[in-house]
Image (tube, grey):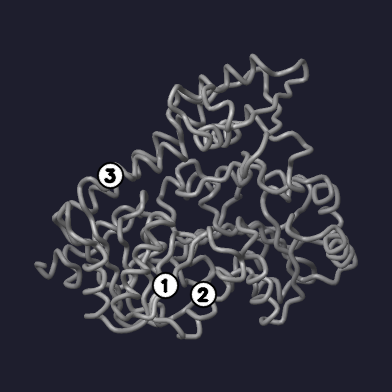
Amino acid sequence: MRAVLRGQDALGVLPTGGGKSVCYQVPALCFEGMTLVVTPLISLMEDQVERASEAGLRSAYLSATQGAPTRARVLKEVAGGRVDILFVSPERLQTPVVRDSVAEWGVRLVAVDEAHCISQWGHDFRPAYRTIARIRERVRCPLMALTATATPQVRADITDNLELVGPETVVQSFDRANLAWHVDRIGPREDRVVRIYRVLRANPGTAVVYAPTRRAVEAVRDGLAGRGLRTESYHAGLDGPERSRVQAAFMAGACRVVVATNAFGMGIDKPDVRVVAHVQLPTTLEAYYQEAGRAGRDGADALCFALDHPTDARLGHGFIDRTHPPLPRLRRLLRKLRRHADADGHVEVLPESHAKWVGRHALPDDVRSCLEALGRCGVVRLDERDSPNGEDTSGPGGVGPVRLRVRPSGGIELATTLRRAARDKLRAVRRYAAGRGCRRRALLGYFGEEGPARCGGCDRCRGR
């Protein structure tokens, strides 16, 4: 905060619960002018606006979920100097209406939230984040980058890509002594729900249980509820009102346990979570640390517990294949797209009918994941008629035909890099699960911090 107030760029790596929002809220209260916050999730913007308003800031956001009259009203208020802090996605930052007007908005600070999304080696890469630095051509003000989880390699990539000049870099310790880290090896036929239930019964208090798929979430939720625990489920397959109801019940203490996919947790600031359990370890240690770190924010003791079996790596590789498809599939699809495109590069794809363009046994979802990967590489993009008002257009979703524009040249080098990075991260998770040394030391070492030889609280140090 002191750095940006004196006009200097800054990079803050602050663990979950470390106060990232305060880092841009306080300068926004001090500056005469507007603070622009780039944030990845539209679903969180309303919550971020509410928190900023509670801090005394005139707050607003722009997104594709708003109607045209609402966006026009927000833009009018911004142009009139009646907004202290504005939240936008990185995709909307590049739309003509924002790009052409931002120089006149009196921006005094640009804050980039979840800045690890900039890096190809981050665990949630978003290509649009790598265009944020263009704003420096239009506004003259300090830029602040904030994230909860970044290795030294990711921190360097953030600094380079955002063109931070002599940034004040603050890296808080990742060490949270109140968290006990446990990984339990299970047998191939052992019921994971029973193991989770025993942990929750032995450790009273509010708990979050993460499961890798929607189907697994519902199965675990039914198993725990059937054993008498007040349990709710949360995943992207539920409608908005139901997700809001579950979140409100969790925050109010009306349910003890929420079983969820990784869709649950961003923006959740409940201090008294005593257990965060993982039915299976995620595919990156960044994601695991971020999710598990939602335990014990009040500083009291809390348990971070995960189940593991050697075959879990198969599901991890399956997730990687869906997010970063095998390169032969991408090359095959790109050849087909270029062959069927018209003179202007336009082509229409129906995933249900064109699965064979990806491979002999491919499914419609495989087509969609490959198109998304090609979109990240910049060799295809959604036709402007299908672009959702300038938000994330890196790839298609939903059902029905997809109209694309294909570049006649360019390759998939980025896809190669991302797939390799994802596989390296999965190997790091496997090393953590099977490692014989202190769990806390292993996690801290991954993030570039030296930990104690023995923490005395993890399962390895306690001998169980």
Residue for point 77% across, 48% down:
389
128 or 115, which is in the foreground? 128
Residue for point 24% across, 62% down:
192
Alpha-carbon neighbours of circle 2 within 10 Å: few (<14), some, or many (≥20)? some
262 or 139, which is in the foreground? 262
Q: Which residue is mark 1?
A: 258
Q: Which residue is mark 2?
A: 246
Which element is circle 3 on? helix
Q: Position of residue 335 (x, y in %)?
A: 57, 17
Residue for point 46% across, 36% down:
324
Q: Position of residue 57 (x, y in %)?
A: 73, 77
Q: Is residue 46 above or below residue 280?
A: below
Q: Which residue is mark 3?
A: 313
Residue for point 52% across, 38% down:
365
Q: CA distance from mark 1 to mark 3?
A: 25 Å
Label whose residue precedes the other's in the sequence (1 or 3): 1
Instruction: Spot the residue most to the left.
Output: 463
